[in-house]
Amino acid sequence: MIEVTNIVKKYVTGDIDFTALKGVNLKIQKGEFTSIMGPSGSGKSTFMNILGCLDKMDSGIYMLNGKDVSNLTGNELAAVRNKEIGFVFQAFNLLPRLTILDNVALPMVYAGVPAKERKERAMEALVKVGLGDRVKHKSNEISGGQKQRVAIARAIVNRPNVIMADEPTGNLDTKSTFEIMKIFQDLNDEGSTVVMVTHEPDVAVYTKRIVRFTDGEIITDEAVKDRVRL
């Protein structure tokens, strides 16, 4: 599903030349549930942005679902994002003036899905995350854990091949964290490939594989030995 070869990313600020990724190589197969971990400044967020087609690398090859996306234009990358990837962010990124249903339906507007189908699929996604009874609420009327469920519903509504989550439990309490990680496990059981950035070891144990970054390089890549099922 994902294969990156010798990925390099540099940032230049004034006289400072900083290499965020130093020739990273990684394969993630279809149906895997992978955590990306590492301290601040390790390169994990830069790597996630490249995997999510939100940022471009300086050199290397990135194959996503059999397609070389290494040298696509900004518009081409946007089209790939909309088709292939569902995003879940720490800050939820919901639009407060829209209902939950309309927030979930929004990616389908950009994908050109007809209105009737948008409503049906958005409703189906909300039922899947346990919010079928809250569709008319707005985001300021629900809890943080429920907001993240809405964000997950929005991420899966276009039926992407990969779900990418950036610190999805960072703003949540323990109970909500359990609920969100169970949803990710269930989606993974149904065949979704999930890639998640987290700095929390007690969250990573719910995944199947942990890739650790330090100073722009992968230092370990291991299966989770004592995986916790919810």
Image (spheres, grey):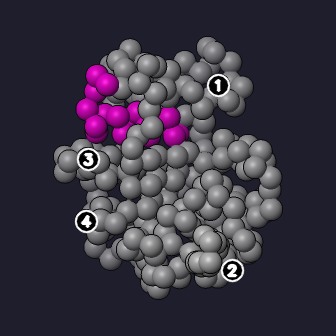
Q: Residues within 10 Å of mark 2 (few under 14, many from 20)?
A: some
Give the mark nearest the N terminus, 1 or 2.
Answer: 2
Residue 109 badge: 1
Residues at circles 1 and 2 in contact by the CB criterion of under 8 Å = no
Disc 3 secondary structure class: loop
Disc 4 secondary structure class: helix
Tell me how far mark 4 sits from mark 3, CA to CA: 13 Å
Give the mark nearest the N terminus, 2 or 4.
Answer: 2
Give the mark nearest the N terminus, 4 or 1.
Answer: 1
Q: Nearer the viewer, residue 210 or 11?
A: 11
- Image location of residue 223, percent across then percent down: 41, 76
Residue 202 badge: 4
* Residue type at the position of mark 4: Asp
Disc 2 secondary structure class: strand
Give the mark nearest the N terminus, 4 or 3.
Answer: 3
**Is 144 part of what is drawn in magenta?**
yes
- Per the rendered image, the range of residues in magenta is 140-156
The N terminus - image quarter: bottom right
* Residue type at the position of mark 1: Val
In the picture, measured across the screen, residue 211 lies left or right of residue 182, that is right
Tell me how far mark 1 sits from mark 2, CA to CA: 36 Å
Q: Residues within 10 Å of mark 1 (few under 14, many from 20)?
A: few
- Image location of residue 197, percent across then percent down: 43, 62
- Residue sitting at 31 percent across and 53 percent down? 170
* Residue type at the position of mark 3: Leu
Residue 172 badge: 3
